[in-house]
Image (spheres, grey):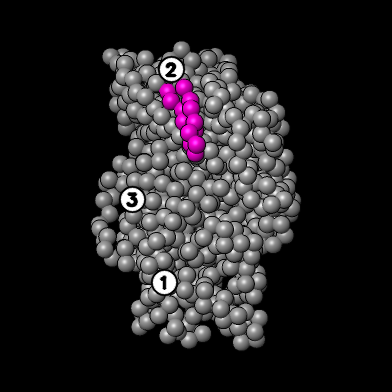
Amino acid sequence: MSEWREYRVSFTKKAQEILNDLTIEEKIYLMSGVQTKKEVRDAVQRKVKAHYNEIPYSSGGIKEKNIPAMKFADGTRGVVCGRGKSVCFPVAVMRGATFNTELERMIGQAISEEVIDAGANLFGGVCVNLPYHPGWGRAQEVYGEDTFLLGEMAAALIQGVQSTGVIACVKHFAFNSMENLRFKVSIDCNKRTEREVFLPQFKRCIDAGAGAVMSAYNSYKGILCGQNDYLLNTVLRKEWKFDGFVLSDFIWGIKDTVASVNGGLDMEMPITHFYGKNLLSAVQNGKVGTDKIDMAVLRIIRTLLAHNERIKSNIRTSDIEKHRQLALQCAREGITLLKNEDNILPIDCGQKRKKIVVFGSLADCDNTGDRGSSQVYAPYIITLLQGLIKYGAHAEIIYYSGKSLSHCTRLAKEADSVIIIAGNNYLDEGECIAKDTYDISNEKTAGDRTQGLELKSEDQCIIHEVAKIRNDAIVALVGGSAIILEEWKDKVGAILMVYYPGMEGGTAFAEVIFGKTNPGGKLPFSIPKKESDLPYMEWDSESMWYDYYHGYTLLNKKGVSPSYSFGFGLSYTQFNLNHMRAWKSEECLYGEVIVENVGNREGTEVVQMYVGIPESDVERAEYTLQAFQKIYLQAGEKKKVVLSCKTSALDYYDEKTSQFIHEDKKYAIYLGNNSNHAELKRIDV
């Protein structure tokens, strides 16, 4: 049992005493969001001077009974509440690219302090849905394609958020990785896929002590997730021993009063439609037992009492400057260098004043990610172009959007360096705001990338046109997931993935371009050579089957090489990984590597350990990530890194017995700095 579980359970007696003194009407009130539909719609429509979740969304709270209200603050890249006050961190996928759990823990604590400043006590921004396909519109909101990476980074965020007492809410439970049809689609898969691929990261969050879970809009095996007895009662509570409360995804998360309560949904948010008087009627008519109500309310009261007590004992003032520096450091560590032919980067302005031409419409726009429920309203945003201009004081920076290709050619000929900013923005990917969603939109915006994973034609045209006259162009890719680049990657000199880098993204980008910062990011997803290498998807289907393989596990199964591997990222220095060895104990597997910085400057490396069971009794991935560690080394410095994982992490789920089965067989441990089979050293133990 985690520390937080023990702490919350210690409030059970007090919560029960309060519960015993409540009327049925008061109990149901605690289960029901108190916003009105008009308030939510007006905020989104901007009919009032407010945006979505500008003030915390509340549920319950009875002051005279000493029951605090639940006050919800949304996010994933910071706190949505407030206007022009919250720090906008890089999106979660870029934070995944840092492979730095300690940094993510610090970001979680910073976010929690801003949650408290906003008057809230719950952060709804721990998103761990697995991107089955990189075309998913909200892939930017999660840490990458790998189950283990998702779980470890999310656990770190939870630890940071709850360090001040704020409730960390994990979402969206579960199988939510299609955006456009999220309200209609039903996902299906076999039990091994469910338990070994799509649910482990959620369990990791529960084991880390998360206090709340949000259900998903989609259905699983034909049953809406917010009404899914199997997911909420059997898996979450009975098997995983979750002691917190479950709230619905907003407005459309449930469709039936009785099915929701009996299915394990404790709280309807952010408005009361199916709960409230409808739930009271269901109880009076005997369709919902009072025991169901009492258990839901006990969970709510207990969690709120425990966390609010911790908040009161940890009141602190947010250090916004410190938080801004965290956002900057995260962007520095997340920027991922994919190609650097002939060490084109960093650009050395030195004694000579260089002319640098920047192309691309995305270079000088506020591009911090999608503009759905995770949009953070920061006090300022430093664009990529602004960062280059501010930092490159000894260079002549010329910007052109790229509308005229002939003008692009003229400018490129005259330049010492060319930087092309290409990729996506909130109109290309993100949360889907469909027609009639809030009665405000004539057409859907963002959503899934159903038209393919390549760059937009205007970006590709600029790259191809510039490549005709020079092969040293630098391409910076903005986006929330994989972008296929086979058509042009061999025609340019350098490629960086900058994701959506937050309010200080331009500063970090310039520092990397000019060499003040050594990029330390590693891809948290695979970049395939062609889309047909990925899992089959029907984006407009109302039913989808998810297979056991995706990402690098699918590429390995097919024997297909990616364009760039999961875990891959270059540096301005060079690292050697030597003296690798591995061993096992009764319960754990170990891998050891000596890492040496053999270059001429400081830098970071991420040592990764993948594990497989070659002679397994069941079909399984050749290997999966089971441990990683990011280390910092000065030029010439060496460090020993020891990684470990429990052998139980490799247990498989037996569908006949509904149990995890341990295999007492030889393990293959793979050590290296990315998932590419050819670059990993295999050691059998």
Tell me, yes or no, whether the two marked residues, 2 and 1, touch with CB atoms within 8 Å: no
What residue did someone put label 2 on?
578
Q: Quadrant of residue 69?
A: bottom left
What residue did someone put label 3 on?
110
Name which of mark 2 and mark 3 comes first in the sequence. Answer: 3
Q: Amino acid at mark 2?
A: Asn
Find residue 491 and report its horizontal and vertical position in percent: 57, 17
What residue did someone put label 1 on?
12
Residue at the image position 59 percent from the left and 23 percent from the top: 677
- Quadrant occupied by the C terminus: top right
Pick the residue in front: 639 or 9: 9
Identify the residue at the far top of this view: 342
Q: Residues within 10 Å of mark 3 (few under 14, many from 20)?
A: many
Residue at the image position 60 percent from the left and 54 percent from the top: 174
Find residue 15 and report its horizontal and vertical position in percent: 41, 75
Residue 612, visible in the rendered structure? yes
Number of numbered labels in the structure image: 3
Q: Is residue 96 magenta?
A: no
Our reading of the magenta stretch's main secondary structure is strand
Find residue 14 and report its horizontal and vertical position in percent: 37, 75
Residue 249, visible in the rendered structure? no
Could you tell whether 542 is left or right of 197 in the image? Answer: right
- Give SS at disc 1: helix
Name which of mark 1 and mark 3 comes first in the sequence. Answer: 1
Residue range in magenta is: 581-593
Mark 1 vs mark 3, CA separation in Å? 29 Å
Q: Is residue 582 magenta?
A: yes
Find residue 592 and report its horizontal and vertical position in percent: 43, 25
Could you tell whether 6 is left or right of 482 in the image? Answer: left
Pick the residue in front: 614 or 198: 614
Mark 2 vs mark 3, CA separation in Å? 37 Å
Q: Nearer the viewer, mark 1 or mark 3?
A: 1
